[in-house]
Image: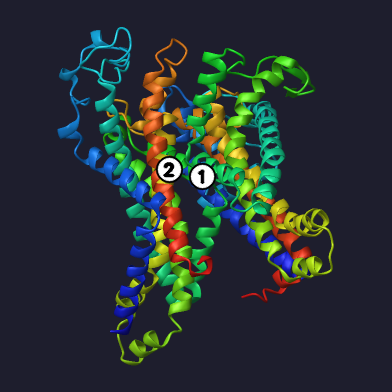
Amino acid sequence: MLSRLKRASVENELLYLFLHSRVAQLAALISVLMMGAAALAAFVAPSNPYDLASFDLLDSLLPPSYMDGGDARFLIGTDDQGRDLLSAILYGTRLSLTVGLLSVAFASILGVTLGLMAGYLGGRFDTIVMRIADVQLSLPAILTALLIDGIARGILPQQRHDDLMLVVLTVAIGLSLWVNFARTARASTFVEKNKEYVQATQIMGMHPLRIMFVQILPNILGPIMVILTVDLAVAILLEATLSFLGVGVPPNQPSLGTLIRIGTEYLFSGEWWIVIFPSLTLVVLIVAVNVLGDFLRDALNPKLR
Amino acid sequence: MLAFISRRLLQSVFVMLAVSLIAFTLFRFVGDPVAQMVGQETSVADQERIRDSLGLNDPITTQFVSFVSDLITGNFGFSYRTRQPISEMILSRMPATIELGIVSLLISLLIGVPAGIYTALHRGGAIANTILVTTLIGISIPTFVIGIFLIFIFGVQLGWLPTFGRGDVVTIGWWQTNFLTIDGWRSLLLPALTLGVYQLTLTMRLVRSEMQDVMKTDFIKFARARGINRHSIHYNHALRNTMVPVITIIGLQFGGVIAFSIVTESVFQWPGMGLLFLDSIRYVDIPVMSVYLVLIALMFVVINLIVDLLYAVIDPRVRTGATH
């Protein structure tokens, strides 16, 4: 009862701070709009960029419709295959967000589970998990993701690799981000496990798994939420970077990073729109998510208030 | 202190062993090394002989030991793709990456530190706020997008600077340098800026928050109470105390610069180690991948070690672990 009351007040405070922060509201609005547009891409996009029949090579490299030589059908122009760039961006955003959300979900489930158990059980399990985390922290996330992708390339035959690309990408990004979740969950669990409510459940003879996931977990969600938001931005960025480097999603299903890579080849011949519009979309998306993350961090950190 | 150093050294050795184990697993089990080396017409018996001569039929622990001792003696083996010795390939690529890293780190320091001090001392001011908002955006823009925008503005629209390759280099011994020709400097400018911008925002935010913390401490208040002039408080008392953690983080940043140069090198076709690693992933050139992995990990471990030891020298609490 007490903990429920406490949680309710934290939520109200969050709401209060949110209603008084214009920047956070704007960031939330942009994030929701972009996620909505991406989720409904199949309905709002003028055409389907994955459908080979829907575009024509004769339409390739057309400038935006407001420019000379533009075509009214293509609001912001077409890419090298004749795909409508706006549709490609909508579908690309959907892909980038899907990979981002899935890999953060994967990273958080893995990281929080390991961190919670390491913090609660302590001992040898804790040592092993934290040693693995140390090793991984000695490499930047982008390197880990690249490496896992490279390993998958070596193990899987080319065809299977292309089919499983999204899974490989999600696992690669997820595995490079779990450490943050594990460390945060572990540190918070250390604090929680010495509190009276946990001791009470221990005395009652509750199963350790139940104590961890039913009693402790809800009380350490605050800091985990912050990491979740911040890492979503990181995951979107990682996916875009991998796709840009040409080791991400297959080219017939372009994500924002792939579109930007294709666009750079046309930068010098004057077709700037292929690179500029996807880049702006990506930047706006990441800035919006980052601003939300910053807001959450400040709002949930009592030291800064 | 000695106990701390040896504990820390042991930990580093453990990390390096773990990374070598990953690299070894990669090398040994991802794809068949023999199949990669020989043509299709090589007979099974011949393949078996090669397998034997390479020691691939030895017990797995023996193989791991010889793998590690090869790494330690600098015998990195051969690339599957180019058949060149990997040590040569990496040595020829290293100067490009290191020069790029140094210049971008300099950019990040020369702009980031003054900007951080300014924003810390002028909290809430119009210029300080503008700088802060700019850096929040700067931190959110992917490195490759920054590179592309720079290429678009300075390479395509204005046509001022070259946008790919190293330009004219001067060779001193085996080290090819960009620093001695004007064209080399011009080629270096855009990639270094691209790589420097992200580090710059980090440096600036770090200096700012450290400086703000120091400004709140009692000894600064006391210095004010003694009537010491503002300038002296800011630059003699506060800045000096700010720089200790900042210097250590900068050490760590150099590792980040080298790692992130993968992306920058790809955008500008800068012929460094990052591009080599990227090619090795694209063509599943496992030996190059595993050597690069070990070298980068070594660099991070050494930098981490130095930083930790520096901390221990400065702050005695770290040595004994009294804070925990």
Q: Amino acid at mark 1?
A: Leu
Q: Position of residue B168 (x, y in %)?
A: 70, 14
- Note whether B2 is above or below B275 in the view shown: below
Using residue A45 as the reference point, say whether residue B26 is left or right of it: right
Q: Position of residue B277 (x, y in %)?
A: 54, 32
Given residues A17 and A187, the one toward you in this image is: A17
Point out which mark residue A287 bears.
2
Asked if residue A164 shows in the view, the reply is: no
Which element is circle 1 on? Answer: helix
Using residue A43 as the reference point, say whether residue A126 is left or right of it: right
Q: Position of residue A126 (x, y in %)?
A: 48, 70
Asked if residue B223 shows in the view, the reply is: yes
- Note whether A211 is above or below A223 in the view shown: below
Quadrant the C terminus of chain B occupies: bottom right
Residue on which disc 1 sits: B136
The residue at the point 34 percent across, 60 percent down is A109
Residue B239 position by quadrant: bottom right
Q: Residues within 10 Å of mark 1 (few under 14, many from 20)?
A: some
Residue A37 position by quadrant: top left
- Note whether B179 is above or below A90 in the view shown: above
Which element is circle 2 on? Answer: helix
- For mark 2, name the chain: A
Q: Amino acid at mark 2?
A: Val
Using residue B213 as the reference point, say whether residue B135 is left or right of it: left
Mark 1 and 2 residues: CB-CB less than 8 Å, in contact? yes
Given residues B297 and B206, the one toward you in this image is: B206
